Image: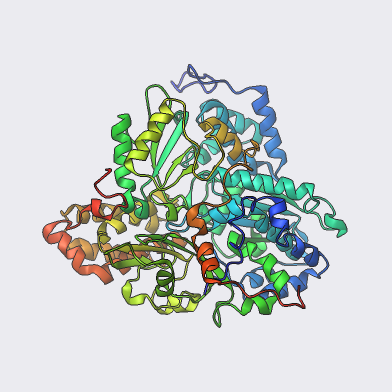
């Protein structure tokens, strides 16, 4: 039921070193890739069915195929690969432990992907708030360079590549690919109007692929195992293995690598379920920007199609599970405060809308709201969704719209009699040490 | 004409000046990138590594080296939350109060931190040793509630462990992070790492913490494995 590939050797003390990685066929995929035609590599990734693991699920090979090649026009400009390692979606915690434990798998994927799209400069844009991950990435780049996997004429192939590890400075919006590119160019991280898309006009207005850490790190295994091997896992349209991050009021929070399409019920059964004496109240399938689900959705296949059919999104597979001690109004207020704080200010619906939604939710949580506030909240969401410049605005409406839909009675209860929940009961340490 | 604006090169007491070395390192950063302006974010981290926050002198240095206006640099510096407008403590403590950590105890931890130190959000103790801030999701939800000190992980905290950690930081004797190097570096030392200067501590510490290994352990117990690579490919 579980299929550890990316996480298969994380329990070895030196998993993050070049030697630790080489022990498990590390950089063999690179040797094989450098003997392969770049277009054939793009086709291989297309054939594997790998879809972006950063949330949107766009086919990775197709993204690579959009890069204009040849000497004419945009194709003649430098090409860039940018790894989105700005993991900040609330609940999402897979790329950070991955880079801590196995930075070389990411780097090998970076080199292969750069070779395929014909980029000689790649960037790993990692969020700044994870110092040790930044160190591990620096070390991996230095070790790979010393081993001849980076630099000029890599292993006699004629292919040159420089990789820069670039630390961000605290801005969730930089996980949005065009905001990330602006940030990497030294500007405020604000999203760009599209089209043109990064594939033709990305970093420095040159052809650019922006891929999530997990997507790129999956590439070496596809090169070694083949497209059919990768596609032998997962479901019809969601191929392969992936990291599911289980968190919250569960007995065993952590990383679970499984084929796409596993269900939350299966994961909870495997891992011992919710904490003792408590039941699952609501959960997010892929971070706070994906609409909330409940115990009614335990058997939803956690693949791109299954979760969409259930009215939410697979997102980053960040399964945040909250039990029946949790106040849903408080939970949604916190997420909304997050979106208001992280809104970049570029567009009015998101900037103003998130601000006002925080005001309303604060009233509701404090027990001073009205029934009309709930209607105003939903109306505000209507005015943000589909009207914001980027997906942050849409994401901000997800917990509110789904939360009111699923728990309207609890919102009404707050209006009539204040919050009925004891926040101490929902902590992991209770009142004993508080 | 004097507009009453603060002089940009004056450095407050106790804040070390930016030196020729700083300028040389800024140019090293610039050399990493195809276009110079890309160096701005790491250069601001570099300024913090010397002065502990983004000073007017730091803004000036970045502007001069990148041929930008100070307004352009200031507009970037104020956009990102990791750039501080006041000096951070030697140990900058972040308590995650995004939904999951808040519910699991982050709110109680942040309240305990403020009470224990007698300071508020984004304030620094009088001795300059510790500053605190409530932070957004730090990608460690499986270790909730999470606390960061100088952006190193202190996983699975409770109010008691938090108070012990704060006392140790104030005494200048903090314990090692749970997933990080064998010693906690200062805010300024950490900022150098983010500026792209390797401090040589990357090979220390665990590969993975216990929660990161839970799925793998379970797979081992159950005998679950991914399909092996086909023989023709291997």
Q: In the depicted view, which residue is nearer to us: A118 or B200?
A: B200
Q: How is the image coloured?
A: rainbow
Point out the residue furthest to the bottom here: A236
Quadrant of the snapshot with the C terminus of chain B: bottom right
Q: Residue at x 52, y 23 (%)?
A: B8
| Corner quadrant of residue A33 | bottom right
Is A240 placed left or right of B163 in the picture? right
Residue B100 in the image: above or below residue A305: above
Q: In the depicted view, which residue is nearer to us: B100 or A237?
A: B100
Q: In the depicted view, which residue is nearer to us: B35 or B210?
A: B210
Q: Residue at x 25, y 59 (%)?
A: A327
Residue B30 in the image: above or below residue B22: below
| Corner quadrant of residue A246 | bottom left
Is A416 placed left or right of A47 in the picture? left
Is A58 placed left or right of B214 in the picture? right
Residue B2 in the image: above or below residue A319: above
Whether residue B122 is visible here, answered yes or no, is: yes
Residue B48 in the image: above or below residue B82: above
* x then y, percent, for residue A160: 81, 54
* x then y, percent, for residue A130: 53, 45
| Corner quadrant of residue A68 | bottom right
* x then y, percent, for residue A425: 24, 54
Whether residue B69 is visible here, answered yes or no, is: no
Q: Residue at x 57, y 20 (%)?
A: B17
Point out the residue furthest to the left here: A416
């Amino acid at each position: 039921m579980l299929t550890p590939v990316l996480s298969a050797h994380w329990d070895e003390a030196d998993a993050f070193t070049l030697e630790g990685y080489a022990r498990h066929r590390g950089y063999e995929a690179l040797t094989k890739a450098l003997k392969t035609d770049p277009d054939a590599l793009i086709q291989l990734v297309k054939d594997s069915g790998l879809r972006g693991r950063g949330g949107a699920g766009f086919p990775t090979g197709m993204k690579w195929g959009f890069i204009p090649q040849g000497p004419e026009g945009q194709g003649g400009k430098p090409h860039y690969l940018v790894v989105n390692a700005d993991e900040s979606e609330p609940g999402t915690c897979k790329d950070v432990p991955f880079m801590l434990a196995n930075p070389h798998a990411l780097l090998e994927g970076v080199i292969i992907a750069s070779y395929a799209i014909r980029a000689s400069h790649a960037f790993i844009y990692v969020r700044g708030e994870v110092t040790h991950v930044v160190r591990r990435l620096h070390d991996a780049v230095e070790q790979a360079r010393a081993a001849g996997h980076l630099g000029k004429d890599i292993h006699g192939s004629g292919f040159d590549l420089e990789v820069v590890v670039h630390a961000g400075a605290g801005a969730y919006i930089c996980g949005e690919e065009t905001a990330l590119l602006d940030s990497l160019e030294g500007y405020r991280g604000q999203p760009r109007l599209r089209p043109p898309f990064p594939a033709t006009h990305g970093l420095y207005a040159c052809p650019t692929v922006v891929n999530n850490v997990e997507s790129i790190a999956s590439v070496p295994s596809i090169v070694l195992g083949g497209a059919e091997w990768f596609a032998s896992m997962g479901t019809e349209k969601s191929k392969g293995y992936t990291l599911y991050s289980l968190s919250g009021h569960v007995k065993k929070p952590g990383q679970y690598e499984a084929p796409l399409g596993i269900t939350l019920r299966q994961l909870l059964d495997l891992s011992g379920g919710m904490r003792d004496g408590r039941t699952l109240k609501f959960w997010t399938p892929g971070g706070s920007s994906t609409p909330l689900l409940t115990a009614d959705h335990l058997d939803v296949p956690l693949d791109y199609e299954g979760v969409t059919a259930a009215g939410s999104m697979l997102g980053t597979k960040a399964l945040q599970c909250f039990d029946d001690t949790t106040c849903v109004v408080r939970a949604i207020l916190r997420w909304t405060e997050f979106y208001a704080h992280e809104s970049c200010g570029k567009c009015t619906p998101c900037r103003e809308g998130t601000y006002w939604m925080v005001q309303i939710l604060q009233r509701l949580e404090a027990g001073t709201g009205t029934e009309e506030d709930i209607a105003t909240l939903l109306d505000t969401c209507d005015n943000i969704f589909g009207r914001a410049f980027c997906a942050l605005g849409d994401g901000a409406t997800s917990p509110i719209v789904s939360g009111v839909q699923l728990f309207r009675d609890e919102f009404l209860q707050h209006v009539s009699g204040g919050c009925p929940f004891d926040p101490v009961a929902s902590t992991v340490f209770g009142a004993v040490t508080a | 004409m004097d507009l009453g604006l603060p002089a940009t090169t004056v450095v407050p007491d106790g804040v070390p000046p930016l030196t020729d070395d700083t300028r040389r390192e800024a140019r090293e950063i610039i050399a990493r990138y195809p276009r110079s302006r890309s160096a701005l974010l790491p250069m601001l981290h570099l300024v913090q590594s010397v002065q502990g926050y983004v000073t007017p002198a730091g803004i000036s240095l970045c502007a001069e080296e990148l041929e930008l206006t100070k307004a352009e640099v200031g507009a970037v510096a104020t956009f990102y939350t990791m750039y501080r407008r006041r000096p951070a403590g030697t140990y900058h403590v972040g308590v995650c109060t995004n939904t999951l950590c808040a519910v699991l105890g982050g709110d109680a931890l942040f309240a305990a931190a403020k009470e224990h130190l007698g300071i508020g959000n984004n304030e620094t103790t009088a001795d300059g040793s510790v500053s605190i801030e409530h932070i957004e999701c730090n990608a460690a939800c499986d270790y909730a509630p999470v606390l960061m000190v100088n952006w190193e992980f202190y996983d699975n905290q409770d109010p008691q462990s938090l108070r012990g950690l704060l006392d140790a930081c104030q005494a200048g004797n903090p314990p090692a992070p749970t997933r990080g190097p064998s010693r906690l570096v200062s805010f300024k030392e950490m900022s150098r790492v983010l500026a792209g200067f390797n401090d040589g501590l990357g090979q220390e510490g665990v590969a993975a913490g216990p929660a990161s290994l839970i799925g793998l352990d379970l797979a081992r117990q159950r005998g679950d494995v991914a399909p092996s690579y086909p023989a023709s490919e291997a």
